[in-house]
Amino acid sequence: MSIQFIQLSDTHIREPGRLAYRRLDTAPYLERAVNAIMALPQKPEAVVMTGDLTDFGRIQEYEHLARLIEPLDMPVYLMPGNHDDRDNLRVVFSDHSYLGQSGYVQYEMPIGKLMLLALDTTMPGESSGALCAERLNWLAEKLDVYRDQPVVVAMHHPPFQTMIGHMDRIGLLSGQAELSDLLSGYTNVERVICGHLHRAIDVRFAGTIASTTPSPAHQVSLDLSENGPSAWTLEPPAFRVFAWHADQGVVTHLAYVGPHDGPYPFHENGQLID
């Protein structure tokens, strides 16, 4: 088994010294996540960051982000979320040619055994997301090209209801049904990976598995009431690990970030420790 990629999402980096929501310095949390990735027993082929890279999409925020992820010694693939600005992202990360020069940030990228198809769901000035015909047509063309190899579709807004009311109201508000119909025609789509929710959520979707991942900093509070408050919490941060097994395809793990005891052995001299 080998690690194909790590999914990081919703880092919400501010300018150095600035706090998110006037309470939270997100930068040290990303530093700890980077250190945790570098300390994994198996080195990932890549890191995929599925949006809300910064809090306001400002040049200084992207510059801060660039410094924070610099220690990663594997390719890092970036995607915008509703808190991002495509133009400023491209300015600061001009060496990331896959971001393109204009328009939607959509690209194909081979990662190990997988083909990553990055799909842009953002709408400038809006917290919610959408998939228009242009974006879906791009995906349809790529799915046809790569129909004979395992594919992971990455997007910021999840194409399913999470049951967290205030987040679903700013979720993917158009294009869900069309995306489902499109993906249902392909049996090689291993996963649909998303951000936006700051939680680990998994759903059967269009014949595959769609998921969101926790933030390396703050999480959205778990409240499944329709009118629950829009609130965040400092539950343990985490990222997703996408590994490849020759007989099973993609195997996903959730890796927590932060100080914790261990690892400790189960056995000593071949015997279970009593």
Image (cartoon, helix red, strand yellow):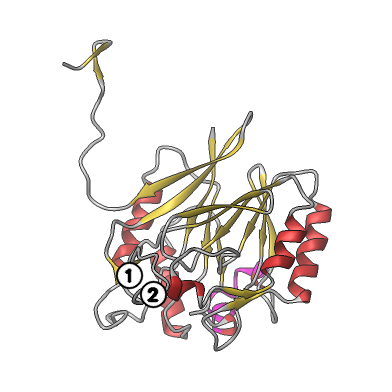
Question: Which structural element holds mark 1?
Answer: helix
Q: Residue furthest front?
A: 226
Between 223 and 10, the one lying in front of the other is 223
Image label count: 2
Quadrant containing the C terminus is top left
Between 8 and 212, the one lying in front of the other is 212
Q: Is residue 96 left or right of residue 20?
A: right
Q: Is residue 105 above or below residue 8?
A: below
Relative image position of residue 240 (x, y in whole percent): 46, 51
Q: Residue furthest left?
A: 274
Q: Which residue is mark 1?
A: 27
Relative image position of residue 122 (x, y in whole percent): 60, 77
Q: Which residue is mark 2?
A: 13
Q: Amino acid at mark 2?
A: Ile
Between 89 and 168, the one lying in front of the other is 168
Relative image position of residue 168 (x, y in whole percent): 50, 72
Whether label 2 touches label 1, CB < 8 Å: yes
Principal secondary structure, stretch drawn in magenta: helix
Q: Earlier in the sequence, mark 2 or mark 1?
A: 2
The residue stretch that appears in magenta: 88-98
Q: Residue at x 26, y 34 (%)?
A: 263
Q: Residue at x 76, y 64 (%)?
A: 139
Q: Is residue 90 magenta?
A: yes
